[in-house]
Image (spheres, helix red, strand yellow):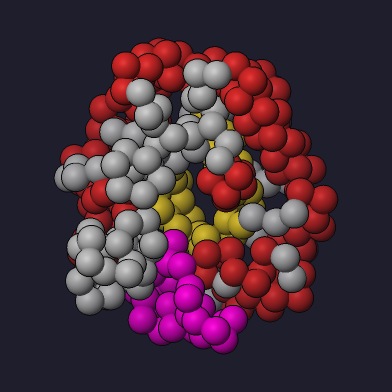
Amino acid sequence: MRINKSIVLTALVPSAREDESAFIRAIDRLHAAGVNTIEYAAPLTDAPRRGELLAQRGLGGIFLAATFQKEQGQNLSAVDREERRYALEACKSCVDAAILSGAKGVLITSGRYPEDTSLEPDAWQAFEESLRALLDHAGGRIRLLLEPGDRTVDARQLAGPTAQVLKMMRRLNQPLTALGLTMDTSHLAQLAEDPHHSLKESMTWCDHVHLANCVLDQASPLYGDKHPAFDHQGAVYTSRQLQETVAFLKDLAPHPKLTLAVEIISRETAPFQMLEQVLMDEAWFFKLA
């Protein structure tokens, strides 16, 4: 099995989302460090140019539609038809931008769990209808990557607990080339799930994992889905534990290629400070083969 090393760039270098020069500087630095996939958000009209810059360097791209979904409250599982229609059209626009960029995939989320819990079955049905519409729209030109999130901590997504997501994946019965899961270690911790168990259970539909940390102490300013550094004091995981998760995945994964992505959110004022810190602190990741 081959490890495909990825970075969630616009978390690590937020200025790279809008600033092309920052994007170029960051991808050149990461390319030199052995990264071969860049996960990013960008203005939709800029996505083709971002894709061109990646292709020139032999790098693959994954477009983060989830960034816009969360920022704008887009909800693909909304029971309200007009709310869901808006979310679906917006997501289709992201899919179109990702296709024009030459991206390998477009990462999406479900939308928030309904405030009225009795509507949960309707929300799952609405989400499945949205996914089928997006799959039709993509038409095999790009892969959808669904990232399950937390249910009660921060993003409060319908999808959601791993067992429920896997039931939906079985119902949809799509090939991995059309629809896959992006499992996130931070989200699994927020769901109070054992990460190795959930990763093992999801492997049929998952060849893409986000290595990410979180703080679950509600008194901390970083409580929730804030993706601090791997060795952040008080966080759920240590760097060593995430390295053990990578070793577990390498032994477990049934796919010929497994994409592992580091997702750390920078809160530094110097735009490239956290990138350089990650290159130093997590040197083991960049040496993966």
Image quarter for residue 59? Answer: bottom right
23 in the magenta segment: no
Residue 9 appearing in the image: yes
Q: Position of residue 193 (x, y in %)?
A: 19, 42
- Left or right: 79, with 62 as reference point: left
* Magenta part of the chain: 262-289
Q: Is residue 115 above or below residue 28?
A: above
Q: Is residue 110 above or below residue 182?
A: above
284 in the magenta segment: yes
Q: Position of residue 251 (x, y in %)?
A: 25, 48
The residue closer to the viewer here, 285 or 135, is 135
Total tally of numbered discs in the picture: 0
Q: Position of residue 35 (x, y in %)?
A: 54, 66
Q: Is residue 137 above or below residue 50?
A: above
The residue closer to the viewer here, 106 or 227, is 227
Residue 66 appearing in the image: no
Image quarter in which the C terminus is found: bottom left
The residue closer to the viewer here, 165 or 203, is 165
Q: Name the residue located 37 percent from the left edge and 17 percent from the top edge.
A: 119
Image quarter for residue 152? Answer: top left
**Residue located farthest toward the front when viewing the structure as drawn:** 116
- Left or right: 60, with 153 as reference point: right
